Image: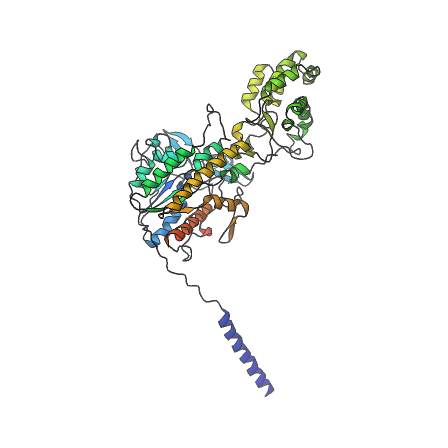
Amino acid sequence: MKFKYICLLAFSIGLISCNDDDRILPEETILPELTSGSVDFSNYVAIGASFTAGFTDGGLFIASQENSFPNILSKEFTKVGGGNFVQPLMSDNTGGILVGGNIARSYRLTFNSETATPQPLNTFLTELGAPVPTITTEAGINIGSDFNNFGIPGAKSFHLIAPGYAGFNPYYARIASAPAATVLGDAMAKNPTFFTLSEVGGNDVLGNALSGGESDMMASNYDPITPVGNFDNALNQLIDGLTSNGAKGVITNVPNITDLPHFTTVPFKPLSPLNPAFGPQIPTLNTIFGALNGIFDAIDPSRRIEFSETEASPVVIFDETLVNISAQIKGALNNSLTFPAFVQSFGLPEAAAPLVANLLGDAYGQSRQATEDDLLVLPSSAIIGTLNQSSLQNLIAAGLPPQLAGQFSAEGITLPLEDKWVLIPSEQDEIRVATDAYNVIIKSITDTNDNIALVDLNNILGELTSTGINFDSFNLNTDLVTGGAVSLDGFHLTARGYALMANKFLEAIDDKFGTNFIVSGNVAKANDYPTNYSPLLQ
């Protein structure tokens, strides 16, 4: 009997346990039905620059366009009456584009795991012994303008309203309705019911930043910041045009682009004494700069140049904001009683002292070592420490032996890095002031127009940079290669980054227009979008 009661008790406990389990099992979450709020998504048009186009890894190609944030958005819009979203797809996945049969933009970047660096696709495949696909997308072929995506890589605010812009931008040349057409005009010809106007103002400062803040109007890479008044005029024309038929839309503000890895990846102190090509040269280099440091100490001690034998040292840069002391350097060296002996220590005759004094004066009149406040652009990583051929030939022509001319032509070491490789603090300030002014104008528009929502790209980039942003099971940040948000070129997004951006648009649309994309679960999923494209993608 006792055994019987024990069995019954065990059975009862089992039943109770099962009942308890039933009670604590979570019920299946029932999401609300998706609603369109006050928006007509039937004819969505996207207008903007490279982000809108889907540019990534230094190129525009079919796969990247298919993962553009407007195309991602359009998939959600179709669930609430959105129509077909047509993109001007490139002809291949090379990332390049031709103008008159010549390469105007070369191959996209891919990741070389052996060197742990981004590398042009054609170089990567050639080194593997693999066939290199041909760039087939031709800018000169007008393929019409019956598209919904008018993302034009490289376009500044005023370019979008400029007649004839197709003659200057191969990406717009492909789709412009006529040689004298405007991007805004072609977009309005679609009679949009809803639009996104993204990253307008980004290229207005980005071009200048990519050039290292180049201020020489004669320089080939000169790209000035768009004046605030010009930006204001262009943006208001764009908004007036896009809303003229009653369409609603979303615009973005301008992020602080100097937070992007294109400007934060290369350290200001990259010269390691452990580098066999640099370390053994440090005593000689310090001897050379020792002849100058006494002059720098007397005029401006912040210009001293000295390399450490125990830790990494900063590169030497040209700083246009420094007073040019070339004349003082030349005078001091030519009047020095010890300088001729210094020159002779390099195997030169005493008579060469005036020549060397003048060369040093010309080279270091506005130079200093970089500080943590300077930003080196990403391409500088491939330049630092290399031999500048122009400097080499000029010094040989001036009378220096080839070996000595080479010693004085090492980029960032004996030859100050040019302005195009560095954003000094004053140049960063100019970019920041313009960006802030653009954003004031953008906010005033969204604050006073019930038909315009705002996506705060500035804040989003700040989050990505500081803490990262959780996206499903991933934490995306702006670290180059490993962060997941920014592509291999250091300033465009990955496909997963564009998916995150699309969700931020959906949040803004929900907040402004009463849709419920987020709470209804109609959003992009991180796992559906890659962070890197295969080099074998054809």
- Colouring used for the render: rainbow
Query: Does the rendering let one see residue 55?
Result: no
User: Is 200 left or right of 407, judged from the image as shown?
Assistant: left
Front residue of this view, candidates 16 and 150: 150
Locate the C terminus and report the quarter of the image it occupies: top left
User: Is 538 left or right of 349, judged from the image as shown?
Assistant: left
Q: How many marks?
A: 0
Locate the N terminus and report the quarter of the image it occupies: bottom right
Q: Residue at x 46, y 27 (%)?
A: 222
Q: Quadrant of residue 328?
A: top right
Q: Residue at x 55, y 83 (%)?
A: 8
Q: In the displayed image of the protein, which residue is found farthest to the top?
A: 351
Query: Does the rendering let one see residue 98?
Result: yes
Front residue of this view, candidates 204 and 230: 230
Q: In the displayed image of the protein, which residue is found farthest to the bottom?
A: 1
- Please provide percent x and percent y for residue 9: 56, 82
- Please provide percent x and percent y for residue 454: 41, 46
Front residue of this view, candidates 533 and 134: 533
- Please provide percent x and percent y for residue 310: 69, 34
- Please provide percent x and percent y for residue 53: 39, 41
